[in-house]
Amino acid sequence: MNSFSHSQDPFKGTFGSLENLADTISEVLHCPVTIEDANHRLLAYSTHEDSTDPARIATIIGRRVPEKVINSLWRDGVIPRLQASDEPLRVSSISKVGLGDRVAVSIRKNEEVLGYIWALEVDRHIADEELGLLKKAAQSAKNQLLQHYTGSRRKQESLQEFFWKLLTGHMNSEETILDSLRDLGIMPSSPVSVLIFQFPQEIDAAFEKNISYITSVNQSVKAQLTATDENQMILLVTSSRKEDLRGILEEFIRSFTQQMAERFGVKGITAGFGGVYNAYQLTEKSFKEAQQVIKIKDRFSEGVEDLFGYESLGIYQFLDVIHEQQRASRYRNPSLAKLQEYDRLHKTDLYQTLDTYLSAGSNAHQTAAVLHIHLNTLTYRLKRIAEIGQIDYKNTNQKTMLYLDLQIQRLFY
């Protein structure tokens, strides 16, 4: 039996470190203890090693809670309940992820969650009257975590300033960049790419924490640097696995958007990443390419939903170059000009019909379905379009140019 009553506080005073506090909690409750930050990164764990479970072992080895464990805790409603209350919570075992019975409590400053304390019930059940002791331990941990976050915020400000220099091309020497990364405590790793998440609302401090939470707990990619710009979160990412970074990023984007919707109710996210490069001095190039992906996805509502990487854009990569040449020569597609003039005079939609038809790969049935018209109606319209615009649907060169000009019109005008 413990020698401490519920009314006593064995956690008063200073402990010097979170490790000492974890050991004290373990001694008081006679069970293994871990302390994590708000993003489930391991900060300290007790030296009580008589008993444990696979989830705790994996957390200590990886210095963070495994992603599959976090996802299970979300699905079972554990993390939402911890975030909503400062009361200790009993967590039943989840055998499929190696999680044994434990009691958890959030470490809070007012409504802000700073971290969590987890006490394992492997060999010993923590009695209800002892739960108050765990709550007192969370109060004791608060001040040390506040100091931890104060230092982290200062470091983050330095990292963001450095990142903006990379994004804007103000650091051109690879050697200087690598030295700066090491000075900031970041181990250089390649390849890297710039990833942009664009949200339907501006990013405030609370919203940024939710974004950072999802990016931190996902363990397939590593965000080396991050910055916010109005409604965009910009990340310099590298892979945590040896697989191709492009495929991993596409997988990460789908997972991120799904989890933001499920956990925080955020929908309508647009995402894109630039080229994948082995040199940090190409960060600006990757950033501009990621911006181009976002621009294309903003302008085109159809056909680009699953395009995330710059290298997957195909012809969309070169529309701005073609547009510049056309603008310099004052080019205008004569067929499209005739259709637009005819639509203006006769209140018809032949221009839009042609755009939809070519975007559908000249598939008449798909075009009719999109336009909600009968196939015979579409056939008549296509015939009139050919007559008015002097268009030969069998002429691949003419059709390709029409398609490009239609996309340029949509993108730039």
Image: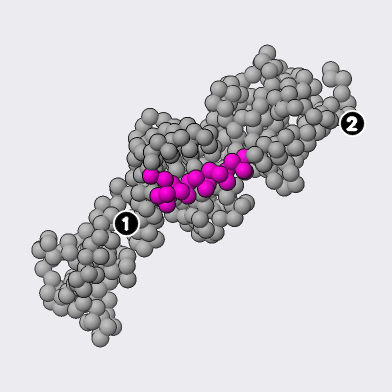
Q: Does residue 71 appear to the left or right of 378 in the view shown?
A: right
Q: Quadrant of residue 70?
A: top right
* Type of secondary structure dominating the magenta stretch: helix
Query: Earlier along the polypeptide chain: callout 2 or callout 1?
Result: 2
Residue 36 seen: yes
Distance from label 2 to label 1 (Cα)? 64 Å
Amino acid type shown at disc 1: Gly
Determine which residue is flagged by label 1: 303
Q: Residues within 10 Å of mark 2 (few under 14, many from 20)?
A: few
Residue that protrudes farthest toward the bottom in the picture: 345
Q: Nearer the viewer, residue 72 or 175?
A: 175
- Percent of width and height locating residue 202: 55, 59
Q: Residue at x 34, y 45 (%)?
A: 275
Q: Secondary structure at mark 1?
A: loop
Residue 77 seen: no
Q: Nearer the viewer, mark 2 or mark 1?
A: 2
From this view, report whether residue 405 is shown above or below residue 3. Answer: below
Residue that protrudes farthest toward the top in the picture: 50
Q: Residue at x 65, y 39 (%)?
A: 151
Q: Does residue 126 appear to the left or right of 295 in the view shown?
A: right
- Percent of width and height locating residue 249: 40, 41
Amino acid type shown at disc 2: Ser
Q: Nearer the viewer, residue 2 or 333?
A: 333
Image quadrant holding the C terminus, namely bottom left
Q: Is-magenta flag for residue 153?
A: yes
Q: Does residue 86 appear to the left or right of 216 in the view shown?
A: right
Determine which residue is flagged by label 2: 7
Q: Secondary structure at mark 2?
A: loop
From this view, report whether residue 244 is shown above or below residue 349. Answer: above
- Percent of width and height locating residue 305: 37, 54
Q: Residue at x 61, y 52 (%)?
A: 205
* Residue stretch rendered in magenta on the structure: 152-172
